[in-house]
Image (cartoon, coloured by chain):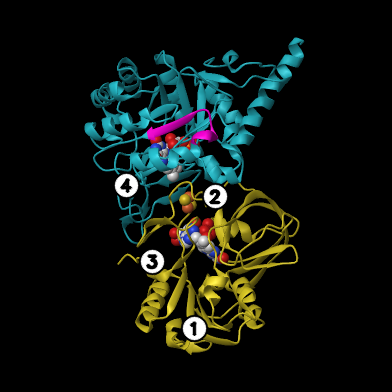
Chain colours: A yellow, B cyan
Amino acid sequence: MTTDLYTVISNKQVAPSIFSMTVKDHLNLPVQPGQFHMLKTLAAEPLLPRPLSINDVENETLTFLYEVKGDGTKNLAALTTGQQLRITGPLGQGFNIDGIVGNARLPKVLLVAGGIGIAPFKYLARSLAKKATVSLAAGFRSNPYAIDDLKEFVDDIKIATEDGSYGVEGRVTLVFNPVDFDVVIACGPTPMMRAVKEMCKQAKVKCILSMEARMACGIGACLGCTIRTTKGMLRVCADGPVFDANEVIFND
Amino acid sequence: MTKESLAQVPDLSVDLCKITLKNPVIAASGTCGFGLELMHFYHPSVLGGFSTKGLTLYPRPGNHGIRLHETRAGLMNSIGLQNPGTEVFVKEILPKIRGLTNCLIANVGGSDFDDYIEAVEMVSAADVDMIELNISCPNVKCGGMAFGIRTQDAAAIVKAVRPACKKPLMVKLSPNAHDLVEVALAVQDEGADCLSLVNTFSALAIDVYTRKPVFNNVTAGLSGPAIKPIALRMTRDVAKAVQIPVVGMGGIETGIDAIEFIMAGATAVQVGTAGMVQPDILPKIIDEMAQFMASQGISNLKEIQGII
Ligand SMILES: Cc1cc2nc3c(=O)[nH]c(=O)nc-3n(C[C@H](O)[C@H](O)[C@H](O)COP(=O)(O)OP(=O)(O)OC[C@H]3O[C@@H](n4cnc5c(N)ncnc54)[C@H](O)[C@@H]3O)c2cc1C
Ligand SMILES: Cc1cc2nc3c(=O)[nH]c(=O)nc-3n(C[C@H](O)[C@H](O)[C@H](O)COP(=O)(O)O)c2cc1C
Ligand code: FES
């Protein structure tokens, strides 16, 4: 991991409020799928950098897929080609590809995305391609996005939208059954993660979650991003963001 | 060497309780873990020193719920002194970090007299260079800051801990004290070797949609650039009043900010929040201080310390 100024190659809107930003990866550090970076524009405010998952790594570029929520992501969305921003990373424990694949020949892996939770799945699916049979179940409030990006790497795609504008109407948990898979990997809002964990537990299927928490340092130094786990309070930024679902204790 | 060439290589070293720091920039407690995370960005030996996460006699899991909340130019935190306890620190962590700096400051907190005394006794007997007594953590119930608010409480805890402390004793003051200068003088009288200030300001944030405070503990501690002008004023107030060295902090982001604290009377400074915003900022602050000194023909920080 390192901290440095990176140059924007492109930063474009791909759906309402959703942007894809590619930067030149001049340092070319090894990046695991599921790891993240802390990003901050050169503006003084907001003070803290914002965590974004790595969406893809290719040809000496890094790509981030992000939803504009508040001032931090608004600043990111305003960056144009050639501008610089500070990026610290790669950070955290990503997906363990060997662990997911295990000894099985072409295990069946399901990726469950809730909204912008789809961000880390492109690089993950790329890394799993040929080693596993990868399916995607993605839920959105309304119009889906970033699906076309994944088509190349996944064998099956199921979509749910809460307003029924596309695919099945309702939550993403309606469109899959964990018993059909060897491993289920989920990233999305907390209620979705909790539901997926519960479904997998009932079905006795291995479940892996990519968790979120508010962060400050992003490097494991401030203990601001901890979540409750069976191993005590663990730091999402340094011990995660990827956790075995059995370890994660959701607060009721 | 001529006078000009001397000024080209300014001397940033400072003496703090008989320890020579190669420069006055110390990483602040709770913002740099136990120093190991810094290694990804620079070797901690380039710093004047670092202060560990607050240690307590028994392990603490820390607070539940939201622990961080950003405000304009500031950060509110309610970590709640999550730490592995003094025994694990001494046996398992200290051996790994001892070599990282020649000024390893162990920050120690507690909730009652016995806790504080036992924790200070254990940690100060180990191979640390200084104890920073935290009587100013606003995030633990019935403790920490409770001792730093009223002068008689601050005096009593320092008096109790002093005989147990085998290393130089730095007492970290709370900006929430009823009378900060009075606390500083009382703590000095009870045997503190130096003072550090300020810890975070007790502050409040409300989520108007849930109609609840953002933090489970209602209040949390504010740090970062927002507090700098107040922290600077407090550093000057205290430095003017006491005879022992003062380590200033609160919102330092640049070498110029650090120079301000020195001019306000600080012997050294600590940097917290800025190091979390940009993990390699502390070495940059040191470089900026050196550049400022060179450009102003200052060869030793003593020339400007406390001039305001
Ligand atoms: C490991 C990790 C990876 C992430 N990857 C992505 C990604 O690839 N794409 C993406 O769009 N988003 C991602 N996020 C979430 C993203 O960091 C937040 O949406 C962002 O920090 C919001 O900042 P803001 O300034 O725009 O909004 P703010 O005004 O700071 O906040 C807007 C809302 O988001 C909440 N929020 C603030 N910070 C976080 C946070 N760190 N996590 C969750 N909620 C937060 C606030 O409570 C508030 O309700 C990730 C978060 C983590 C922890
Ligand atoms: C996340 C966080 C954790 C902290 N933990 C401690 C602690 O354990 N002990 C302590 O004495 N101060 C602690 N502090 C206070 C800092 O050491 C420092 O006094 C304060 O943040 C002001 O400096 P700054 O504005 O440079 O951050 C903490 C501050 C932050 C932001
Ligand atoms: S954000 Fe600081 S420890 Fe995770």
Q: Is residue A150 visible?
A: yes
Which callout, 2 or 3, points at the residue further toward the start of the chain? Answer: 2
Q: CA distance from mark 2 to mark 4?
A: 31 Å
Label 3 or label 1, whichever lies nearer to me, is 3
| Callout 4 and callout 3 share a chain | no
Q: Secondary structure at mark 3?
A: helix
Residue of label 4:
B60
* x and y percentages locating residue B68 in the rendered image: 42, 50
Which callout, 3 or 1, points at the residue further toward the start of the chain? Answer: 1
Residue of label 1:
A161
Label 2 or label 4, whichever lies nearer to me, is 4
Front-most of residues B82 and A139:
B82
**Horizontal relation, residue B61 to residue B249: left or right:** left
First to last magenta residue range: B98-107
Which callout, 1 or 2, points at the residue further toward the start of the chain? Answer: 2
Q: CA distance from mark 1 to mark 2?
A: 32 Å
Residue type (three-letter) at the residue carrying disc 2: Pro
Residue type (three-letter) at the residue carrying disc 1: Thr
To which chain does the residue with label 3 belong? A
Q: Secondary structure at mark 4?
A: loop
Residue of label 2:
A46
Q: CA distance from mark 2 to mark 3?
A: 33 Å
